[in-house]
Image: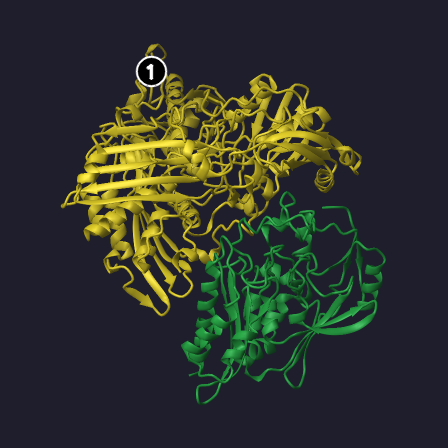
Chain colours: A yellow, B green
Amino acid sequence: MNAEQKPAPSQWQPGVTPDEVMHRHGMIGKPVSRLDGPLKVAGKARFAAEVPYEHLAHAALVHSSIARGRISELKTEAARAAPGVILVLTYQNMPRLQNPPLFGSAPKAVGASTLPVMQNEHITWNGQPVALVLAETHEQAEYAASLIEVRYDVLPAKTDFDAAKRQARAPDTILGEPPAIEIGDAEANLQAAAFKVDATYRTPRYNHNAIELHAATVAWQGDELTVHDATQMLNGTAWTIAQLFGIDEKNVRVLSPYVGGGFGGKALWDHQILAIAAARLAQRPVRIVLSRASVFRIVGGRTTTEQRVALGATQDGQLTALIHTGVAAMTPYNACPEQFSFPARHLYATQALKVAQQVADMDMMVNTFMRAPGESIGTFALESAIDELAGQMQLCPIELRRRIEPSKDPVSGLPFSSRHLLEAYQRGAERFGWDQRNPVPRSRRDGEWLIGMGVATATYPYYRMPGAAARIKLTNDGHLTVSIAAHEMGMGTATAQSQHVAERFGLPLEQVTFELGDTTLAAGSLAGGSSQTASIAAAVIAAGEQLIDQLLMLATGDSPLAGFKRDQVEAINGGLAVRGDTTRAETYAAILQRAGRTALQCEAPAPEPAELQHYSMHSFGAQFCEVKVSAITGEVRVTRFLGSFDTGRILNPKTAASQFRGGIVMGIGLALTEATEFDPRSGRIMNPSLAEYHVPVHLDVPEIDVMWTDIADPHSPIGARGIGEIGITGVGAAIANAVYNATGKRIRDLPITLDKLL
Amino acid sequence: MNPFSYERATDAASAIRLANATAATRYLGGGTNLVDLMREHIEQPEVLVDVTPLAQTIEVRADGSMLIGAAVKNTALASDAHVRQAFPLLSRAILAGASAQIRNMATVAGNILQRTRCTYFYDEAARCNKRKPGCGCDALQGFNRYHAILGASDDCVATHPSDLCVALVALDAVVHLQGAAGSRSLPLTELHRLPGAHPEHETELQPHELITAIEIPALAFAGHSAYRKVRDRSSYAFALVSVAAALDVDAQGRVRDVRLALGGVAHKPWRASKAEAVLRGQAATEATFLAAADAELAAARGLRDNGFKIELARRTIVAVLQQLTEARA
C-alpha cells in the first residue's frame, strides 16, 4: 500500500537534480496580464494608508533639525491644546521598548538599526523623529506638530564624508562575505602591466522615492496587534515588532497585500513603531502616512561612495590585475556596507584580484538597500574602467570582455550554474546596431548634438532566502490555492506565481489562486535580493510533493493511479497521470470525490539553498545605450536603450519586461539626474521633495528595448533567477561610456550633470 | 498647515476690502506655490482671499498689444492664438515651466508673485534672511547650483524661478495694480527687487496691493522670438539658465532691434539691457553676440556650485541669437 511506502525523494534536489518544470512550456513564459491590474485601475486594491477603521486617529511627525546632540527642552503645550489633538508622544511618555534587533542578526530580524526608538533625549541624525502628534484628522495632527518647539544641546557631528572617510574602517563582513580578498599581487601586476587604468569614481547619495508614500494603519485589540503596512518583509516585521514591544510574535499580524513600489525601502522604520506605541497609549487605531519630506528624513537611501578601480592588462587583452576598493558612508548602528565590490569578485578572469571595502561612520540617517545596492554603483565604477581600458587598447569593449570571460568563478573557483553573458552581448549588439558605433570619441554629430554609444555589463547575484514555506489547499472542485506571506510590490508576484503553480500542477490559470500579503499565511521570505520568485518556488515544490503523496494515498482501489509512487506520476490535465502513459490518469476532483474528501491541505518549508554551495550563481546582462550631448549646454539625453539579459527562465515576458525597463529607468536617474543634497555642515537633506530631487521624467526616458536569453538555470527552481534588480546595474556605466564616446569626456563622478560637460 | 479662513472675492474692490480686514491675509490664485509654502509653514495666513474669479479675460487690441487678466491660467495664455502668433517666446516660456497639471491651475499674477525655490528658504531648520531677516543665509556656502550669478548680495543669493516672467520682461510688460490708495501701473522690470540688505522685501507692492492685469505692448518683431531653458532634467525642473529673445535683423544683416532677458540667474527676471545696447546697430554675427553676452555677464559672480552658469548663460545667449538669425536667413 502507498501509505506504508516511504515518500519518493524530491525530484528537485538543490545543487544536484534540476527542477523538471523549468523545461515545461505552457503557462510559464506566457505574457499574462497582471491579475490585480483591473483592481488597481479601478482603485479597488486597498493599500496600507487606505484601510478603514472606526475612531481612527491620525499621526504626524516632528523631526530633529540637528544631527547630533540632546534635546534640552520640549515645548508641547500649544500642540496639546490644539484642536483635535489626542496625544503628543515624545521620549518622555514613549512606552519603554527593546532596541530593534538589527537586520541579519537573527533569522527574522529586520531592524534598520540598533538605535532605540524615541527612548531618550539623544539625537543621532538630522531628521530623527522627536515627537509624534495624534489627532482626529491628518490636518490637525500636521498643524499641531508645527506648534511643537524643540531646543537642543548641539554636539559636534560627523556629517562630512570627505572628513569621515579619513577614519574609514573595515566592517566585519559585507553581507556575509569578507570585506577584502586578495588573490596574487594585484598592485605589483598593475605596475608591470602593458596597459593600465587606475581611477577614482564617486557616487552620491540617492533616496527612495516609490510612488506610494510609506504608510501604516495599526490597531490593538487587547494584546493582539494588527499592522496594515507597506512592506517587503512581512514575517520579519511581525517578529521584530514583537521583540520591540515584548509580546508574542503570534499576537502580531502584519498585512500588506499591495505595495506601491518597494525597491528595498519598504521596510521597518520608526514610523510603524511610533504609530504602534501611540495606538497603545491612545487606545485608538492609528494611521500614519509619511510626507515625502519625512520619507527622506526617516527612510534610508543608497549611501555615497568613493571607489578605486585599477586594471592591468597584457598586450592581447588578458587581465593581470583587477583592483576594486573604496569607502562607503555608513553608521555604527546599521549593517549596509553597500557591496560595490561584489561584481568585481565574479565577473572577469584575472591573474590577480584585490577587492577591499571600507565604511566611514557618519552621523546620518542609516543607509539601506536600494535596488541593487552595491552592484548598481559598483558596476558604474568597474564597467567605466573596463571601457577606459578598452579605449586605451583600441579594442572594442565587447571584444575585451570576451577575452576576459572566466571559465569558473574567479574567487570561489566554483563552476557557474549558468552563464551566457557573451551570448547576451552578441544578441544585444546585433539588435542594437553596435557596429554603427564609431570608436573615436566625438566623431558623430547631428547639429549641436554630439552622439555616442556605450555598453556595460549588468550583473546581480542569485539569492534564495531561507524561511519560506508554502501552504496548499486543493478542493474537490479541482481548485488549488497556494498561500504564502509573500509580497506584491507591483512586480507581478501573484501573476507569475499563479502561472508557475498552474504549470506545476497541470491546471488552467482559472483553477489556481495565489494568496499573499498576510502573516497568517505560511511564512514567506523577505522580498529582497531579487530572491522572492525562487524562494517561493522552492517552497511550492516542497509542499506540492506532499500534496501529491497525499493524493496518491487517496488514489486506491479502482483508481488508475493505485499503487504508483510520486516519482512515477506527473501533474497534467487537472490531475495526475502515470509518466509515459497519460491514459492512466485521474483528475484531482475525482481523487478527492472518490475518497469523500472536500479538500486536502498541506504545508512545507523550502529546502536550504544548497545549490549555492555547489555553484556560483549570478544573472548577467549587456546594457547598450545611445546618448546625445549638446555641444552648447552639455545637456545629456538618452536617445536609445537596449538591455539584453541572461537571467534564467522568464516566467512572464510582460511583467519581466516591466521589471527590466523599470530598473533601466532608475539607472538613468542614477546616471544623470538624481542626487540627494546632504549638507555636510548640518547633515540635513536639503532637497526632500520630488520637485528638487530629480527622478527622470517621461521625457528623459526613451523607448527601452529589452530581450533575454531565456536559458533556464539548471540549478534554480523553475530555472529562474531574480530579475528585479539587475535592470539598474550597468546602466550608469553604459551611459557614462556613451557620454565619453560622444564627447571625449570621461565623467567619473555621478550624476553626469551638464556642468561637468561644459 | 495652520488653520485659515477662505474668502472669495467677486471683484478687485471686494478683494482689497477683504484683504485689509486682517494683516495676515494672502491672495489665493491657483495656489500652486502658496499652498506648498503653507504646507511647509513658510506662509501662515489667517485668511485666504480667492482672487481667481477676477479678470480671466485675454484682450487683444487692434494694435496687437494685449491686456491679460491677472487670473488667466497659464495654460490659457500659452495656448492663446494671438500669443502663439505674435509672442511665441511667451507661449514657449510658459510651456517650459512646471507641469501640465500645475499650468492648468496657476494664474499669471500668481506666477509673477511666486517665491524663490531656494531649498534653504523652504527648510525651517536652515537660516534664511527672507524668512527671518538678519539671521543669515545658509545658501551662500551651501547647495547653490540654482542660485544667482547677477545682482545677488551677501544676504541673499536666491533666484526668481519663473519662466513666464522672463518672457514678459523681455516684452516690456506692464503690471496693473489696485490697492487701498487707488490704481497704478508699473513696468514688470521694476516690480521685483534685488535682494540687497532686505531680501524679505521681494517686490514693490504695497500691503495687499493686487495685480489686476498684465499689459504687453505691441512689438512687431516679437513674432520672431525664442525661449530656451536649460535644466537638469527634460521637464519639471527649474531653469539653471533660460534665455528669452526677440530679434529684428535688417536686410544688411544688422541688428535693428532686440529684446533679451535671462531666467535662473537673479533675484528677479533679468532684462539683459547691457547686451541689448551692444547688439543694437551691430552686425548679427557670433562675435557681436559674444560681445553682448560678455557685456551682460561682466558683473556675474559665481558661488560654490553655480560658477558654470556664467559660461552656460553666455553660450545659451549666443545660441539663441544665432538660432533667430539663422531662422531669419
Position of the N terminus of chain A, as image quadrant, is top left
Indicate the position of residue A671 as horizontal and vertical percent values.
40, 49
B198 is higher (above) or lower (below) than A372:
below
Indicate the position of residue A534 as horizontal and vertical percent values.
38, 31
Give the letter of the chain under mark 1. A
Mark 1 highlights which residue?
A7
Q: Nearer the viewer, residue B193 or A413?
A: B193
**Outermost residue toward the left in this view:** A316
Position of A371 compared to A60: left or right?
A: left
Residue A24 visible somewhere in the drawing: no
Q: Nearer the viewer, residue A292 or A162?
A: A162
B291 is higher (above) or lower (below) than A396:
below
In the rendered image, which quarter is residue A715 located in?
Answer: top left
Position of A162 compared to A53: left or right?
A: left
In the rendered image, which quarter is residue A291 located in?
Answer: top right
Position of the C terminus of chain A, as image quadrant, is bottom left
A149 is higher (above) or lower (below) than A431:
above
Position of A23 compared to A509: left or right?
A: left
| Residue sitting at x 45%, y 41% | A491
Q: Nearer the viewer, residue A485 or A642?
A: A642
